[in-house]
Image (tube, rainbow, N blue to C red):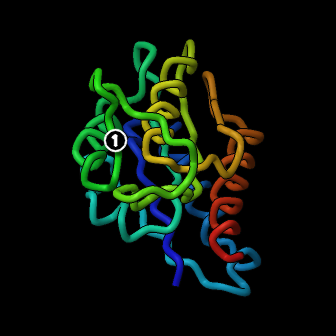
Amino acid sequence: MPRLLIVHHSPSRSMQSLLEQVASGAHDEDVQAGTPVEVVVRPALEASADDVLAADGYVLGTTANFGYMSGALKHFFDSTFLAVGGALDPSGAPAVSTGSTTSGRETTGRPYGLWLHGRYDLTGAERSVHSIVGALGWRQGYDVLGVLGEVDDAALDAAYALGATITALLTD
């Protein structure tokens, strides 16, 4: 059975609402009708390399803090990156994958989705996540959901679609 791992940092009602919608979309019965997908939800501070390696796709959720992803999501990447096949270039920066499967990159080619919430700017947070998942060789499976300010019905609908879409990619 394919497995979707949802890793999140949801310290606010806004992030919790988005998480609930992503998870609901991932559990959508119509999406899972042909091939059931196991959906595993882990707070970023609890997710492990074993969780990443056991998953076939990922949805990541983070707040945008001072132009960067949350410290909790950064901790998740710091504690799992090398163990799941991430690579560094000679300068110590993440080595961007070309998307082809290479030895040592166990998670290359797996789809991911991303949602972010912030009050002022999401650019740096989005860029930092893309930099790391690029070095893991993951492929973006759906548009980034970026929510500035209040979470409205359109954002909740988009979060549901994000979870459903990444799940659907695992049922093909």
Amino acid carrying mark 1 in the image: Ala
Above or below, 110 relative to 3:
above
Q: Secondary structure at mark 1?
A: loop
Residue 87 placement (x, y as % from top left)? 34, 41
Residue 49 placement (x, y as % from top left)? 27, 58
Residue 42 placement (x, y as % from top left)? 36, 58
Q: What's the residue at 45%, 15% (across, down)?
A: 67
Which quadrant is the C terminus positioned in?
bottom right
Say which of 160 and 4 sits in front.
Answer: 4
Q: What's the residue at 72%, 87% (across, down)?
A: 34
Q: What's the residue at 50%, 48% (across, down)?
A: 137
- Label 1 crowd (10 A; few <14 / some 14-19 / many >=20): many
Above or below, 149 relative to 109:
above
Residue topped by disc 1: 87
Q: Is 14 placed left or right of 77 in the picture?
A: right
Above or below, 29 relative to 22:
below
Say which of 162 and 77 sits in front.
Answer: 77
Above or below, 46 relative to 38:
above
Residue 1 placement (x, y as % from top left)? 52, 85
Q: Is 30 placed left or right of 98 in the picture?
A: right
